[in-house]
Amino acid sequence: MPAPQSTSNVVDVLRINGVSAGATPDLIIEIPHGATRTADFTAVEQALTSPLPEGLADFFHVNTDAGAPELAVALAHRFVTLEPTKSVAILRCRIPRTFIDCNRRIDANPAELKEGKVTPGLMPWVTSAADRELLLSRYRDYVKAVDDAVGEVMPKGGAMLLLHTYAPRSVGVEVDLDIVKSLRAAYTPEKEPTWPLRPEVDVIHKTLEGVSLAPQKVVSTLETALGVIGVPLADGESYPMHPSTLAYGHVTSWPGRVLCVEVRRDLLAAPWTPFAQMRIGDAECAKLAGPFAEAVRAWWS
């Protein structure tokens, strides 16, 4: 199985090695919503011909996983410092989920997505056939890169961390052609504080039936390590592991070897803002990297 390589506008592959690491990475950190810079959005926007909602960049910034790439790098460096025989492969998607979501099964039933309150794979404003094929081609390239990494790492006893971040509050708006208008109304100074506050860190592990798919030793280690710095760990409070996600395929294919986690963005951004590219703090990432590194070590302890 070939090792995945970085591909422009699709995926950045970064390998961080310990001083005596082997040839095959031990840990994959996947960031499927890693297109977090305004330039990521603009590059795709300019390549499309579909009429897009005015101000769609606002949705991009609110909905992308700002801070996840920086936390992944800090975590990986901390991990290989603690475990110098290990190495980490970070796969960062550079395709904005504003257009196509690289953590979705494209063939997922739209009715099931809506019932599960899951955003779609291919967004409704992408109407041109050429645009759809452009995005689907990049999507397929990204999924192949992840599959190649999984094929290289997981059969040899590796592990996988699916790293996400989310906005501080759960804002109830429909992902439709009025998304920008709805978001601007939802984030007025009067309205924003009324939305439910999300957990600071949450393990996404329960199926729709309530069955846990998480590696319990890793989770308990993470809970203890986060507790030392005063950050509580939630038990799948935000949303379930939905079958329409590609994450679901990973966790069910490799029982006990895959963990999906959400981190609230205001723990990483300095400061958090909804409609602009955020500056991610080094100190904020370092604070969380330690507990996460301790947790992933539990896969080999």
Image (tube, grey):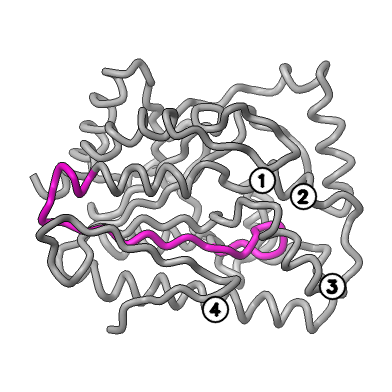
Residue at 56 percent across and 64 percent down: it is 102
- Would you say residue 92 sits in the magenta stretch? yes
Q: Which residue is mark 3?
A: 127
Is the residue under label 4 in contact with that under label 1 (CB below 8 Å)? no
- Residue corresponding to mark 4: 140
Residue 184: % across, % down: 85, 35
Q: Earlier in the sequence, mark 4 or mark 3?
A: 3
How many marks on residues?
A: 4
Q: Nearer the viewer, residue 27 or 136?
A: 27
Which residue position is annotated with label 2? 175
* CB under 8 Å between discs 2 and 3: no
Quadrant in which residue 233 is drawn: top left
Q: Which mark sits nearer the N-terminus, 4 or 2?
A: 4
Q: CA distance from mark 4 to mark 2?
A: 23 Å
| Residue at disc 3, secondary structure | loop
- Point out the tag, 2 or 3, that comes first from the N-terminus: 3
Left or right position of 263 against 298: right
Residue that numbered label 1 is attached to: 63
Q: Amino acid at mark 2?
A: Val
Magenta-drawn segment: 79-102
Q: Are marks 4 and 2 in contact (CB under 8 Å)?
A: no
Is residue 185 at all visible to an observer of this figure?
A: yes
